[in-house]
Image (cartoon, helix red, strand yellow):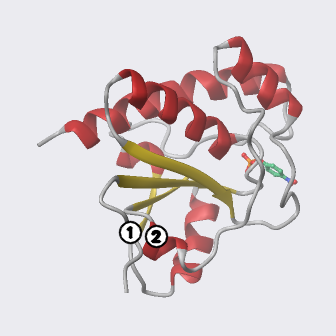
Amino acid sequence: MSTRSSTASVLFVCLGNICRSPLVEAVARQRSAQAGLAVTFASCGTGNWHIGKGADPRMVRAAAAAGYDLSPHRARQVRGEDFNAFDWVLAMDCDNLETLVSVRDGRGAPAELFLPWSGLRTPMEFPDPYFGDMQGFQEAVALAERGVDGLISRLRAP
Ligand code: 4NP
């Protein structure tokens, strides 16, 4: 049985749920509210290392500089029921997608790649900034904004 609500809902998924997916969640929440779009957003990770922790401090800093507040975020791991609870489950990269396909095990919403789903041709995968420098985190913010603008256009389309 589906547990979906009447409001459209999107779950963003990365590996640790401390960098990319919480960033995209915060950007999507802010920009969709500005666009007057009623959509529920959430995020999670395929891995279990950071469950219960806040977003990476470098990601928090880069997001804050662009006006996005990641301080309330707490990481959680994806679970099978997520595919019944959300309309779309969008992975940041192909590794995440592969894991999601096996967790989904045929139920509910299909798992797809976030950036192509949002209409971006390049890049197809959202680069992981975790092992890089601050510039990678700043670039992640700009890419999240591009992806979210595409996602909002898609959700708005009749
Ligand atoms: P995220 O980044 O998937 O964008 O949250 C990462 C966070 C943590 C790790 C890798 C990527 N890690 O190896 O702990």
Number of the label disc, if any, that sits on residue 4:
1
* Element assignment for label 1: loop
Question: Residue 138 in the image: x percent, y percent?
Answer: 70, 20
Pointer 2 and pointer 1: residues touching (CB < 8 Å)?
A: yes
Mark 2, residue position: 85
Please say if 20 is above or below 6: above
Q: Quadrant of the C terminus?
A: top left
Q: Is residue 155 left or right of residue 42?
A: left
CA–CA distance between discs 2 and 1?
5 Å
Q: Is residue 19 left or right of residue 1?
A: right
Number of the label disc, if any, that sits on residue 131:
none
Question: Residue 40 in the image: x percent, y percent?
Answer: 45, 48
Q: Residue at x 41, y 28 (%)?
A: 33
* Element assignment for label 2: helix
- In the rendered image, which quarter is residue 64 located in? top right
Q: Residue at x 55, y 46 (%)?
A: 125
Q: Residue at x 57, y 41 (%)?
A: 25
Q: Is mark 2 within 8 Å of ligand 1?
A: no
